[in-house]
Amino acid sequence: MTYTSDITIIGAGPAACAAALTIKQHAPELSIILLHDNRRKHRAVESLSPHAGSLLRRIGVWPQFLAKNFLPTYGTSAIWGSEVLHSNEFIYQTEGQGWHVDREVFDRLLQDIAEAIGITCLSNTQYIRHKDSNEQIQLITKEKDILNSITTRFVIDASGRNGAFAKRMGAEKQFIDHLIAVFGIFESKNSNKKPDKSTLVEAVENGWWYTAGTNQNQQAVAFMTDADLSKKLNILEQNSFLAYLEKTQEVKKRSLDLQFLGALEAFSAASFFLSKMGGKQWIAVGDAAYTLDPLSSNGILKALRSGILGAYATLDFFKGKWESGLEKYEKLTFAEHDAYLKTREEFYKEEKRWSTASFWQRRGHALKP
Ligand SMILES: Cc1cc2nc3c(=O)[nH]c(=O)nc-3n(C[C@H](O)[C@H](O)[C@H](O)COP(=O)(O)OP(=O)(O)OC[C@H]3O[C@@H](n4cnc5c(N)ncnc54)[C@H](O)[C@@H]3O)c2cc1C
């Protein structure tokens, strides 16, 4: 099958949908294709920052978002810097109500709204490679086992950490760390014992734990550490995971009397940014451009914002002002990333209890030249 479009967006997550919806608001005449690679594994639960409300309004999805009744959250409890449990309104933020979102439901909502306003969403479709000539790019995609082609004028890489297109265009990932997340799920078999829906973070010698109840009767528990340390700790092995969990002060209490469902899942949570955010006929947005430490709980917010900013740069391309559009986008994105790095550094430096442990040493010193 052969398709044509003015713009092809690789990915169908929050950055992709925010970009598509923003472009359609300003230039409804431009045709847009979204590629949705459904093979992606979703995490059990993610927190959506209170500040996301204004962006969801801006891209025109607020009433539909509210209608989903995602679980409200009012902050995070943390054991960080001392053994005292303290509460704060999200780790990096100071006010408002956030939400626990089931990412499958959230992403589907955005995709459905995009489709309803005339954006083509090709599901089960993966970008494989491309050829470019002067004016057009020909993308080769795979739908299950069938190869298709899309002829397009502009590509937005919103493929998340994969950065599938940017990589082929020579953009390099500059890594800040090699954090990984190992998730285990616990379930309540007893109707009187409900999982605790609030978010709890606890620092330990080799990283930090995170736990939150999901919308089902389940409690997600994750250990965040560096990839090399995870091997030394053997944390992907169930008994080691449970033994380290048992050593925590507060997180273990959340899983008491709940049944461990067994299979552990590991996700890359590394922080990186791209050496360049775009090129002749393309731009990278969301996690494809740069990633945040999950400690910030701001990844979805950043993806929405970056998708919106990337959309304005893309509109500049179609107005014949691409050079200045890309320059503005890169400048803003690098400035936001610098500000984020400072906050991240300050936050990690608050924890001084394990000053000789590699995990904390790397965070205290990693950002110095
Ligand atoms: C362990 C962990 C916990 C997190 N917790 C939170 C949290 O609590 N709150 C929060 O705000 N953020 C959290 N984040 C971050 C958040 O998940 C991301 O920042 C956010 O999903 C980025 O959105 P995106 O649209 O850029 O990319 P993604 O959501 O990753 O979407 C990428 C899309 O591209 C598609 N894709 C990939 N490759 C291809 C290809 N070759 N062809 C076609 N499509 C492709 C994927 O299928 C997907 O649809 C967490 C991250 C991690 C690792």
Image: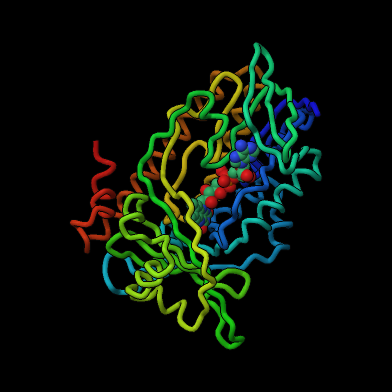
Q: Nearer the viewer, residue 231 or 226?
A: 231
Disc tally is 0
Residue drawn at x 45%, y 54% is: 294
Check the image and name the residue furthest to the bottom: 192
Image quarter of the N terminus: top right
Q: Nearer the viewer, residue 220 or 20?
A: 220
Residue drawn at x 38%, y 42% is: 339
Residue drawn at x 27%, y 60% is: 351
Rendered image coloring scheme: rainbow
Residue drawn at x 61%, y 21% is: 281
Is 120 placed left or right of 100 in the picture? right
Q: Nearer the viewer, residue 119 or 240?
A: 240
Res 304 → quadrant: top right
- Residue 74 visible? The answer is no
Q: Nearer the viewer, residue 280 or 93?
A: 280
- Residue 140 visible? The answer is yes
Relative vertical location of residue 82 with respect to residue 33 in this rendering, above or below: below
Is 17 placed left or right of 273 in the picture? right
Residue 170: % across, % down: 48, 24
Residue 216: % across, % down: 63, 72
Image quarter of the C terminus: top left
Res 336 → quadrant: top left
Check the image and name the residue furthest to the left: 356
Relative vertical location of residue 126 with respect to residue 103 in this rendering, above or below: above
Relative vertical location of residue 288 with respect to residue 66 in this rendering, above or below: above
Residue 107: % across, % down: 66, 51
Relative vertical location of residue 351 with respect to residue 268 in this rendering, above or below: below
Residue 96: % across, % down: 52, 63
